[in-house]
């Protein structure tokens, strides 16, 4: 997972440490990396005020959505701008099931997954014929259409989705007694809203972790490799026996399904859904989060949501610091746009790739000598495969 | 090959599969579907709806042509086009209301300004990238769109502004045909669109720069080999497209009023029109624009009376545009009059 990156250019700068993959040092290094991620995540809800914790829970929700987008955009090369619509579908599925059928939140997640998987497959079927920018065009139109579809009055759609106003979740996610004990949120010092915020944060992060592991394993599997091969060279992949159509549709459906889970989480964290959270504006913001964190990088999932949530917080303030403009929230959008342009120019791989480039100066992991007995001849060139993940 | 298909399918079916055939079939379906509505609502109402749609059709056509020109030159779908046009319309409005420029001069100045901006964008932001690598280009056009929208909102406010009409727009300025009103504005818009198409035709077919443009859009590599300065030609394409977009925005701004997102709402229809007509066919996109406009007007007008379609309101036409884009790309990706591209992956 933390595979050696840019093995070609690394020869110029000698890294301070060279680790052999599979040695105990390497495992310690990996464990250290995970701890660096895990410790702040575990401590955050207990140290930060409750509204920050709620924001972090939102980050985790958007992180799942971005993980889903990344499957399509980053690993399968299907340029989709409309995943926000699948997020919305997941969120509305959760809301409607909780409100109308009084389901448990946890039960709605698989349903949201299935609904978005089917919807993704339906939109993804055209992806077989529609390539590149055409797919971007279709999905862009989908992002614009989705908020309007919610307001259709026929068939009780507007009644169920709440139309323009959106809906509040009637049954909020409240921790049970056992969970309170496990999470140490039973103390006297905290009020109920803090406890709920912490619980939501834990739920969102757990779901993000599960999705992360699922996607990581999928990428390592046969299907995931097929996806990446398809992105890198379609004809080459077809010649090597990758079923193009099946892989494309499954990749798109899976990415939609995971984006849908992200949407469910966002609905759960916000306790409400509305057409303004899943419109074309958010399509741009999530796209920005994705490319800023890193297209085609697994660890972008942790960062992407953070960018989505906190840049919306920071951008207006950053604009306020510039004395030329009057402080105006309007200019925040310019910052998102500027980010998109700057990332395309200077950080094509996003923050994660950028960080990897710097990390390569300090620690370099030498990949294990290819084990040809189980990989066959393809194992002779492992570097591109690890770099892609 | 073609002879075999003709023999086995018959000339009629072969014709039906060409662009004109599909177009005729579509028109026939639209007309047949409208017959009951015309009988019920009367000819006057029907004519009124057709006239109402002409204005939209002309505007969609101008906007779609702007998209098509960039697509022809670079095979790039310009997601920033709508907002470049929107910004130009703001510039025009600003010159007119704050500095007292006559409206048409303001329109031309705005077109020139945005043409310069468009060519600058091409030179600085688009050219460094390989167009066949779609993601960075899409990011950049999206980014430009967001920046322009923010700046329009920042400079001129988020509220709606009334846009001065470039044509006589008194309620009394209209013809009456069979009881339906045909406004001078509509006629003016159509005339401007016609002049513009004629101008583009002359520019592309009778001038040296047009020849270079056609060479580049046909094959960049070959054009470069025979000495066409491809970079400058693409820059010219962007400038032309930006100027046309501004013209389209100025023509429609009277009806929609100015606000930072007014073209972004409209551009889906232009996308639908261009996709239907063929993303690399100027004539096709004009036809597509009028079909989209007529169907939109009829569906939103008569839709309420058709049982089960009572939810059709004006902005649900967006759904129609989305479905249209999807269906066309699925079944005839080149559109009615576009050239089929053989994908070399």
Image (tube, rainbow, N blue to C red):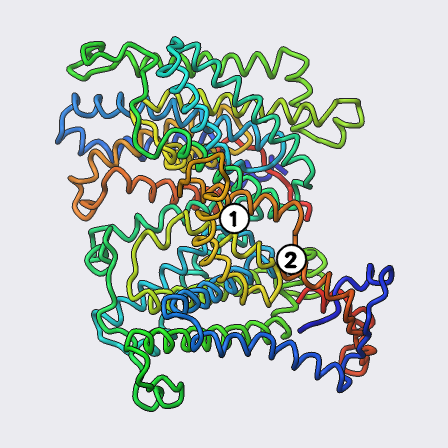
SS at circle 1: helix
Report the front residue among A363 and B26.
Answer: A363
Chain under disc 1? A
**Left or right position of A38 against B58:** right
Report the front residue among B174 and B258.
Answer: B258
Q: Please tell me whether residue B195 is drawn above or below residue B52 in the rendered image.
A: above
Q: Position of residue A111 (x, y in %)?
A: 36, 72
SS at circle 2: helix
The residue positioned 45% from the left and 52% from the top of the image is A82
Q: Position of residue A350 (x, y in %)?
A: 62, 56
Q: Position of residue B78 (x, y in %)?
A: 53, 36
Q: Residues at marks 1 and 2, common chain? A: yes
**Left or right position of B306 against A199:** left
**Left or right position of A240 against A142:** right
Q: Position of residue B242 (x, y in %)?
A: 52, 25
The residue carrying mark 2 is A231
Dot 2, crowdedness within 10 Å: few (<14), some or many (≥20)? some
Report the front residue among B201 and B32.
Answer: B201
Number of numbered discs overlaid on the protein picture? 2
Q: Quadrant of residue B266?
A: top left
The residue carrying mark 1 is A135
- Residue contact at pointers 1 and 2, CB within 8 angstroms: no
Dot 1, crowdedness within 10 Å: few (<14), some or many (≥20)? many
The residue positioned 32% from the left and 76% from the top of the image is A196
The answer, for residue B12, to whether it is visible in the render is no
Q: Please tell me whether residue B66 is drawn above or below residue A200 in the rendered image.
A: above
């Amino acid at each position: 997972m933390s595979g050696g990156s840019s093995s070609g250019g690394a020869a110029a700068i000698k890294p301070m440490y060279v680790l052999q993959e599979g040695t105990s040092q390497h495992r310690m290094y990996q464990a250290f990396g995970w701890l660096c991620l895990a410790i702040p995540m575990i401590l955050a809800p207990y140290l930060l005020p409750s509204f920050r914790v709620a924001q972090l829970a939102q980050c985790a929700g958007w992180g799942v959505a971005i993980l889903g987008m990344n499957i399509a955009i980053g690993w399968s090369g299907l340029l989709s701008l409309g995943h926000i619509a699948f997020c919305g579908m997941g969120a509305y599925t959760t809301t409607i099931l909780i409100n109308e059928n009084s389901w448990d939140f946890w039960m709605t997640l698989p349903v949201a997954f299935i609904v978005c998987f089917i919807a993704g497959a339906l939109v993804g079927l055209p992806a077989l014929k529609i390539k590149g920018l055409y797919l971007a065009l279709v999905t862009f139109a989908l992002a614009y259409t989705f908020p309007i579809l919610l307001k259709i009055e026929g068939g009780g759609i507007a009644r169920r989705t709440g139309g323009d106003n959106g809906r509040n979740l009637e049954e909020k996610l409240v921790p049970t007694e056992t969970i309170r004990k496990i999470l140490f949120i039973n103390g006297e010092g905290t009020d109920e809203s803090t406890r709920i915020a912490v619980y939501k944060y834990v739920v969102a992060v757990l779901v993000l972790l599960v999705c992360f592991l699922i996607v990581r394993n999928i990428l390592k599997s046969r299907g995931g490799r097929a996806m990446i091969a398809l992105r890198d060279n379609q004809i080459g992949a077809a010649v090597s026996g990758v079923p193009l159509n099946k892989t494309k549709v499954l990749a798109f459906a899976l990415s939609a399904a995971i984006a849908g889970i992200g949407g469910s989480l966002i609905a759960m964290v916000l306790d409400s859904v509305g057409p303004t959270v899943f419109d074309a504006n958010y399509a741009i913001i999530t796209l920005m989060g994705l490319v800023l964190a890193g297209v085609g990088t697994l660890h972008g999932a942790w960062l992407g949501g953070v960018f989505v949530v906190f840049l919306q917080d920071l951008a207006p303030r950053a604009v306020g610091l510039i004395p030329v403009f009057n402080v105006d929230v309007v200019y925040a959008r310019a910052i998102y746009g500027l980010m998109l342009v700057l990332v395309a120019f200077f950080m094509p791989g996003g923050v994660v790739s950028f960080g990897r480039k710097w990390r390569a100066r300090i620690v370099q992991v030498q990949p294990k000598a290819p084990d040809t007995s189980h990989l066959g001849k393809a194992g002779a060139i492992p570097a591109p495969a690890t770099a892609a993940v | 090959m073609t002879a075999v298909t003709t023999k086995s399918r018959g000339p009629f079916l072969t014709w039906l599969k060409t662009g004109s055939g599909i177009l005729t079939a579509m028109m026939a379906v639209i007309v047949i579907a409208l017959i009951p509505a015309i009988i019920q609502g009367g000819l006057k109402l029907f004519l009124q709806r057709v006239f109402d749609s002409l204005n939209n059709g002309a505007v969609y056509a101008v906007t779609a042509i702007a998209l098509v020109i960039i697509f022809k030159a670079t095979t790039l779908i310009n997601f920033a086009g709508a907002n470049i046009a929107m910004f130009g319309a703001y510039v025009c409005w600003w010159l007119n209301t704050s500095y007292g420029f006559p409206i048409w001069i303001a329109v031309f100045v705005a077109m020139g300004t945005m043409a310069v901006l468009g060519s600058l964008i091409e030179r600085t932001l688009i050219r460094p990238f390989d167009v066949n690598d779609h993601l960075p280009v899409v990011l950049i056009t999206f980014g430009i769109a967001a920046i322009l929208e923010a700046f329009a909102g920042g400079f001129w406010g988020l509220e709606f502004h009334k846009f001065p009409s470039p044509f006589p727009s008194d309620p009394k300025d209209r013809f009456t045909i069979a009881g339906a009103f045909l406004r001078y504005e509509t006629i003016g818009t159509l005339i401007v669109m016609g002049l513009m198409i004629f101008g583009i035709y002359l520019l592309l077919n009778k001038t040296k720069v047009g020849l270079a443009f056609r060479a580049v859009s046909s094959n960049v590599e070959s054009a470069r080999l025979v000495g066409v300065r491809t970079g400058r030609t693409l820059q010219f394409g962007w400038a032309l497209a930006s100027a046309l977009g501004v013209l389209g925005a100025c023509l429609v701004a009277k009806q929609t009023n100015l606000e930072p997102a007014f073209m972004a709402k409209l551009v889906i229809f232009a996308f639908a029109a261009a996709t239907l007509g063929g993303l690399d066919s100027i004539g096709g996109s004009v036809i597509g624009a009028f079909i989209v406009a007529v169907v939109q007007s009829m569906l939103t007008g008569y839709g309420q009376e058709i049982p089960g379609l009572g939810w059709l309101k004006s902005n649900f036409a967006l759904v129609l545009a989305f479905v249209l884009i999807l269906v066309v790309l699925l079944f005839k990706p080149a559109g009615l009059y576009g050239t089929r591209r053989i994908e070399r992956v």
